[in-house]
Image: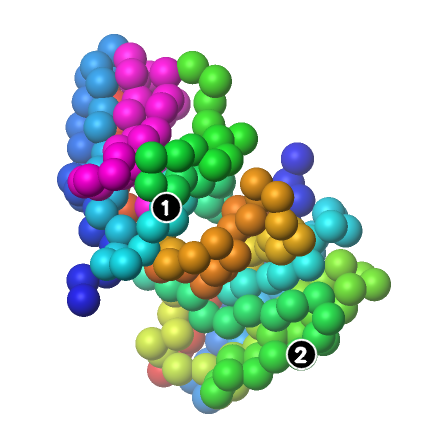
């Protein structure tokens, strides 16, 4: 049973381009969380999704960022018109049920904006 | 607004000795606490957790202590091993429900180095 799969592992984008980060949860997990880790900081919650629903997006920047978790396929975190400040490691985690806190993280996508 | 703080950026310990990592929080609504371990280029791995109804939880070499009145928790690793060298994050949550369910607030992390 594969763990949480994130791709790509590394992504380089020029300022103004779009970045798409993918997360495939563990088999049987229908809850997905996205976190961002800026350099020298801890992980910051961005968004919590269930299949086809955004449950809590309180940590998402108001502009340029969006997330989805369709009925079929991976969860996608989309960043439009990237800026240098978006450079960070983006981690996805999944859990089998609500209220499950020791959830499993993927290895992350390291986004570099040049 | 840093609600979970790990004031020691790094800790160096000799193999076989005890490692004590500390964490303070400010939000009195937090009622569930976790420790994660992270190696470079990997995602965090869940280690141990504790509910606010307890003051201690033990799992093998790892013990977490919670002092609610001081809003302080600590992770003890005994005995420390070189393979424990990693970044350790504490995290907190309001487990009481609502749309915050499952959302974690992390500290900045402490780099633990265990010397052979």
Residue B8 position in % (x across, y down) = 59, 57
Q: Residue at x 48, y 31 (%)?
A: A57
Q: Residue at x 18, y 33 (%)?
A: A11
Hey, which quadrant is residue B51 in on the image? bottom right
Please name the residue that numbered disc 2 is placed on.
Answer: B56
Q: Is residue B112 above or below residue B9?
A: below
Residue B36 position in % (x across, y down) = 46, 62
Nearer to me, A85 or B103: B103
Q: CA distance from mark 1 to mark 2?
A: 29 Å
Q: Is residue A62 above or below residue B8?
A: above
Q: Quadrant of the C terminus of chain A?
A: top left
Q: Quadrant of the N terminus of chain A?
A: bottom left
Please say whether residue A89 is one of the residues in the magenta stretch.
yes
Q: Residue at x 33, y 17 (%)?
A: A83
Hey, which quadrant is residue B85 in on the image? bottom left
Hey, which quadrant is residue B70 in on the image? bottom right
Residue numbers of the magenta segment: A64-92
**Is residue B101 shown to the viewer in this render?**
yes
Q: Residue at x 51, y 64 (%)?
A: B35
Label 1 with label 2: CB-CB less than 8 Å? no
Side of A7 where B35 appears, left or right: right
Side of B55 where A76 appears, left or right: left
Q: Is residue B20 above or below residue A93?
A: below
Nearer to me, A37 or B11: A37
Mark 2 Cα shell of 10 Å, populated few (<14), some (14-19), many (≥20): some
Mark 1 Cα shell of 10 Å, populated few (<14), some (14-19), many (≥20): many
**Residue extending farthest right:** B69
Residue A100 position in % (x across, y down) = 48, 60
The chain letter for the residue carrying disc 2 is B
The chain letter for the residue carrying disc 1 is A
Please name the residue that numbered disc 1 is placed on.
Answer: A32
Helix, strand or loop status at disc 1: strand
């Amino acid at each position: 049973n594969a763990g949480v799969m994130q791709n790509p592992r590394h992504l380089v984008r020029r300022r103004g381009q779009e970045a798409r980060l993918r997360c495939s949860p563990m088999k049987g997990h229908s809850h997905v969380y996205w976190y961002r880790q800026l350099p020298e900081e801890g992980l910051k919650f961005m968004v919590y999704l269930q299949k086809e629903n955004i449950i809590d997006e309180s940590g998402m920047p108001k502009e340029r960022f969006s997330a989805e978790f369709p009925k079929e396929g991976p969860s996608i975190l989309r960043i439009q018109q990237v800026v240098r400040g978006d450079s960070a490691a983006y981690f996805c985690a999944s859990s089998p049920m609500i209220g499950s806190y020791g959830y499993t993280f993927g290895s992350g996508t390291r986004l570099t904006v040049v | 607004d840093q609600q979970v703080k790990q004031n020691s950026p790094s800790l160096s310990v000799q193999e076989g000795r005890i490692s004590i990592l500390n964490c303070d929080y400010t939000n009195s609504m937090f009622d569930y606490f976790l420790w994660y371990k992270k190696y470079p280029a990997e995602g965090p791995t869940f280690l141990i957790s504790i509910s606010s109804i307890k003051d201690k939880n033990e799992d093998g070499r790892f013990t977490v202590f919670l002092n609610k009145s001081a809003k302080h928790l600590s992770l003890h690793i005994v005995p420390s091993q070189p393979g424990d060298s990693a970044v350790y994050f504490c995290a907190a949550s309001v487990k009481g429900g609502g749309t915050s369910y499952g959302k974690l607030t992390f500290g900045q992390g402490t780099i633990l180095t265990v010397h052979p």
